[in-house]
Image: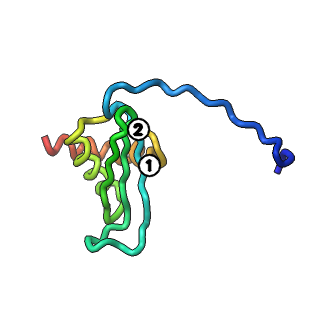
Amino acid sequence: RTLPKGRITQAPLGKMPRVNVPFQRVAMDLVGPLEPRTHNKNRYILTLIDYATRYPEAVPLQSIDTETVAEALVCIFSRVGVHFQSSGSTKRNTDGYGIPVYIKCYERGK
């Protein structure tokens, strides 16, 4: 420790802009691997929560490769609309590789 116990200062809170439009900003996360697997061989869960409405969504997945996650996002956003901003621990996965594949899958489905 660099500071004596009990002397740790709290970081200041940042301001988050208010979101009034449903699915304008969502939080995504991947849970897993889970054991034992389900009867459909699913080991992961893609979770998504809308910041404006607090609407939760959970999709069971057999793997977390780019195409599987993108297909799950297509299923979600085809029902609720395409979002504009995302946050969460999967952001590096979805912003780096998943979103271009998601867009490609979405355009193919049109």
Query: Is residue 73 shown left or right of residue 92?
Result: left
Q: Establish if 37 lies above or below 85.
A: below
Seen from the viewer's position, the closer of residues 29 and 55 is 55
Which residue type does callout 2 highlight?
Ser
* Residue at x 42%, y 73% (from the top left corner): 35
Q: Secondary structure at mark 2?
A: strand
Query: Is residue 17 shown left or right of residue 99?
Result: right
Question: Extreme right residue here?
Answer: 4
Which residue type does callout 1 highlight?
Thr
Seen from the viewer's position, the closer of residues 35 and 68 is 35
As measured in the structure, the alpha-carbon distance from the residue carrying label 2 to the one carrying label 1 is: 9 Å
| Numbered label attached to residue 90 | 1
Which percent across, then down, holds residue 32?
43, 63
* Residue at x 24%, y 36% (from the top left corner): 81
* Residue at x 44%, y 24% (from the top left corner): 18
Q: Secondary structure at mark 1?
A: loop
* Residue at x 37%, y 32% (from the top left corner): 52
Crowding around mark 2 (Cα neighbors within 10 Å: few <14, some 14 to 19, many 20+) is: many
Which percent across, then down, holds residue 39?
27, 74
| Numbered label attached to residue 86 | 2
Quadrant placement of the C terminus: top left
